[in-house]
Amino acid sequence: MLGVLLHEAAHSLAWNRGIRDTSRAHQYHNKRYKELAEELGLTIRRHSTCGWSISTVSEETVNRYQDEIAVLATAITAHRRLEPSVIRPGDQHIPAGEDSGIRDRNGRPLICGCSPARRIRAHKTTIAGGPILCGVCRKPFTSPDHD
């Protein structure tokens, strides 16, 4: 996680300093990106088609950010969803969402009040956590069959 954050921070640093650090629709990372990423503590190697984009976090950087890493480790909990099993001839098929242990991997559909309506998908616990507001119309996303 720290590597991803520092990678993106290097792009942010480039933007703030007015430095063009990528080309080819932001796919190729140039030498200026490499220098910025190294400034933030990443070790950068060259990829044959994406430029200076292969990054690793050095031990020194891990030590420098150990307090932040601890906070992130506490705050972030990864949940692996159950994968739908392969249905073979003769197996009993139980549709996703029923008591099969198989869950809807795409979330539940939601729409907002925009015209045309913007659409997103969210997990039921995210929906239950409170309103999800549209940044355009400022109205909450709701179920399409919501009256």
Image (cartoon, rainbow, N blue to C red):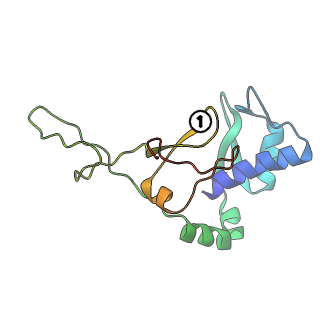
Q: Position of residue 86 (x, y in %)?
A: 23, 38
- For badge 1, the amino acid type reads Ala
- Which quarter of the rendering shows the N terminus? bottom right
In the rendered structure, the answer to whether residue 19 lies left or right of residue 112 reads: right
Q: In the displayed image of the protein, which residue is found farthest to the right?
A: 18
> Residue 21 at x, y = what percent?
81, 38
Q: Secondary structure at mark 1?
A: loop
Residue extending farthest left: 90
Tag 1: Cα neighbours inside 10 Å, few (<14), some, or many (≥20)?
A: few
Left or right of 96 on screen, residue 108 = right
Q: Position of residue 22 (x, y in %)?
A: 78, 34
82 and 94: which is toward the camera: 94
Residue at 75 percent of width and 52 percent of height: 9
> Residue at (59%, 51%) from the top-left corner?
140
Q: Nearer the viewer, residue 17 or 98?
A: 98
Nearest the viewer among 138 and 80 is 138
Give the number of marks.
1
Res 68 quadrant in image: bottom right
Q: Quadrant of residue 75?
A: bottom right
- Residue under label 1: 117
Name above or below for residue 4 compared with residue 119.
below
Judged from this view, the residue extending furthest toward the front is 147
Residue in the image at 88% along x and 40% along y: 19
Q: Does residue 129 appear left or right of residue 104 in this picture?
A: right
Residue 54 image point, x, y percent: 65, 42
- In screen coordinates, is 137 left or right of 132? right
